[in-house]
Image (spheres, rainbow, N blue to C red):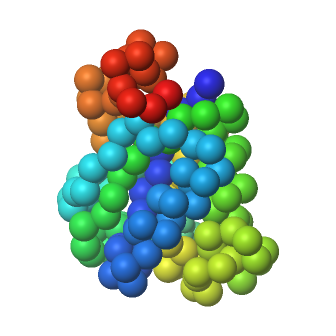
Amino acid sequence: MERTLIIVKPDAMQRGLAGEILSRFERRGLKIVGLKLIHIDQALANRHYGEHQGKPFFNGLVGFITSSPVIVGVLEGTNAVAAVRSTMGPTNPTSAGPGTIRGDLALELGRNMVHGSDSPESAEREISLFFRPEELLDYTRDADRWIFE
Ligand code: DAT
Ligand code: MG
């Protein structure tokens, strides 16, 4: 089992496609173990996108991700990092195939709808930026108390 961080970005929120995006991950078989609606501030955006600091698109990227509330979530499943990335499609939506979130719903590189961690190490780092451990469900521990498994 693996966990990964997703962000439903401002373009998806503004277009009313948050449910569509979460639904695609759920239908893939990934479990939502953490979820919140937040407005990312500049400091958090700088940390989250730290690897891109100094790149020409960095300021635009931070401006975009802080431009409206977003949904951040933690998804769990077998190879969750790779499963989320393949469900999203490649970074540039014009290269993303049909059937992927970016291929079906986006066209612009700077408006590509969704974030997903790019490795298990990034996932661990990013999850800890947005969630405290007690905010995440543990299905293995708690499934017998819930009406689903
Ligand atoms: P991804 O979101 O697929 O992990 P990334 O981590 O390389 O892609 O970049 C983060 C975001 O920055 C990406 O979703 C869109 C934006 N971005 C990346 N490369 C860009 C570029 N050359 N010009 C403008 N925006 C870019
Ligand atoms: Mg990335």
| Res 54 visible | no
In this picture, is 8 found above or below 135?
Answer: below
Identify the residue at horizontal 49%, vertical 28% (top origin).
Answer: 149
Please say whether residue 90 is visible from this viewpoint: yes
Q: Quadrant of residue 86?
A: bottom right
Write down the quadrant of residue 81 in the picture. top right
Q: Nearer the viewer, residue 61 or 77?
A: 77
The quadrant in which the N terminus is found is top right
Residue sitting at 63 percent across and 73 percent down? 102
Q: Position of residue 25 (x, y in %)?
A: 57, 54
In this view, 134 is above or below 71: above
The answer to whether 61 is drawn above or below residue 4 in the figure is below
As drawn, is 44 to the left or to the right of 99?
A: left
Q: Position of residue 94 (x, y in %)?
A: 72, 83
Residue appearing at x 41%, y 68% in the figure: 18
Number of dots carrying numbers: 0
Considering only vertical position in the picture, is 13 above or below 90?
below
Residue nearest the viewer, comparing 71 with 25: 25
Most extreme residue toward the top is: 141
